[in-house]
Amino acid sequence: MKQQKPAHLRNVIAHIVLIILSFMCLFFFYILIINATRSHADLQKGFSALPGNAFITNLKNIANDGTFPMFRGIVNSLIVSVSSAAICTYFSSLTAYGLYAYDFKVKKVAFTFIMAILVMPTQVTAMGFLRLITKMGMYDSLLPLIIPSIASPAVFYFMYSYLQSSLPISLVEAARIDGSGEFRTFNQIVIPIMKPAIAVQAIFSFVGTWNNYFVPALVIQSKDKMTVPILIATLRGADFMNFDMGKIYMMITVAIVPIIIVYLLLSKYIIAGVTLGGVKE
């Protein structure tokens, strides 16, 4: 009985802590949705935990605002996020497979070089990147937001670690003996094995690209090509007399809907991804 009481107490404390953390995480989403239902005048009055009656009005104000292409911004963000997630996960997996399955003289040098790029902030290379895409004629287009996703050191390292723990090199050698080409081996044998890792990184890549503000603000000028974070920033930077807080909260609410859908559809892979790399051959 003495041993059961401490265990029972630990369970109670653990549940209390989890409830508190869950409340803290969900509370801000709740307030966001509540504020999206309130008008600008109501929001100026202060905090309220009760919903207002301006939800449809705020949604119509955003949808019918000719100077604010909300739906076009969502489409742009979806194009960039989905394309970046697909390119990032595939080519990072391919790079990780190349370094894992092949032995060559500069293998360690290549791995170290990729890891060195991982610690380099995006802001350091921003001006050089901007000059490059301007000379290539890609300024004010969505391509500079998608193409650089091919090189993602963080995703590469995750994929490389997963291959070390989950892909026996003997399986690759057996495929080579059977006459399978390298790309066929990668696409038909390695990719199915890496499916959990690819799904997890696709989720995080999608969310990271969807929320990215710095690079789109650097290269996008036309309103019809702006992504959701830039459009929200333009609302926030509007003239004080035309400033509508209800529209901002509504736009943020609309912007997080695709992210919530992605998490709901693929959340099981996030849980599975926690154990990735935990078992060695």
Image: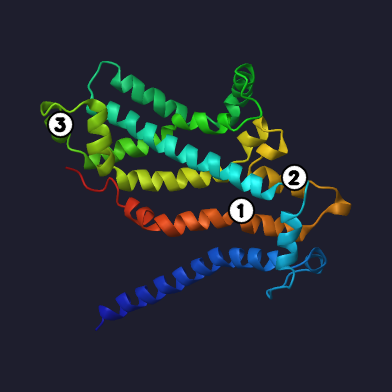
Q: Earlier in the sequence, mark 1 or mark 3?
A: 3
Q: Residue at x 13, y 33 (%)?
A: 170
Between 1 and 100, the one nearer to me in the picture = 100
Q: Amino acid at mark 1?
A: Ala
Q: CA distance from mark 1 to mark 3?
A: 45 Å
Question: What residue is pinned by disc 3?
Answer: 175
Q: Farthest bottom residue? A: 1
Mark sitting on residue 255: 1
Q: Amino acid at mark 2?
A: Thr
Is 2 displayed left or right of 137 in the figure? left
Q: Amino acid at mark 3?
A: Ala
Between 204 and 84, the one nearer to me in the picture = 84
Q: Earlier in the sequence, mark 1 or mark 2?
A: 2
- Circle 3 sits in a helix, a strand or a loop, which is it? helix
Residue 228 seen in render: no
Q: Residue at x 47, y 72 (%)?
A: 19
Q: Residue at x 40, y 29 (%)?
A: 115
Mark sitting on residue 234: 2
18 to 243, vertically: above or below: below
Residue 43: give x, y in percent of width and height.
78, 66
- Circle 1 sits in a helix, a strand or a loop, which is it? helix
Between 137 and 20, the one nearer to me in the picture = 137
Is 278 displayed left or right of 79 in the figure? left
Residue 42: give x, y in percent of width and height.
80, 69
**Dot 2: within a 10 Å radius of its alpha carbon, few (fewer than 14), some, or many (20 or more) residues?**
some
Between 46 and 96, the one nearer to me in the picture = 96
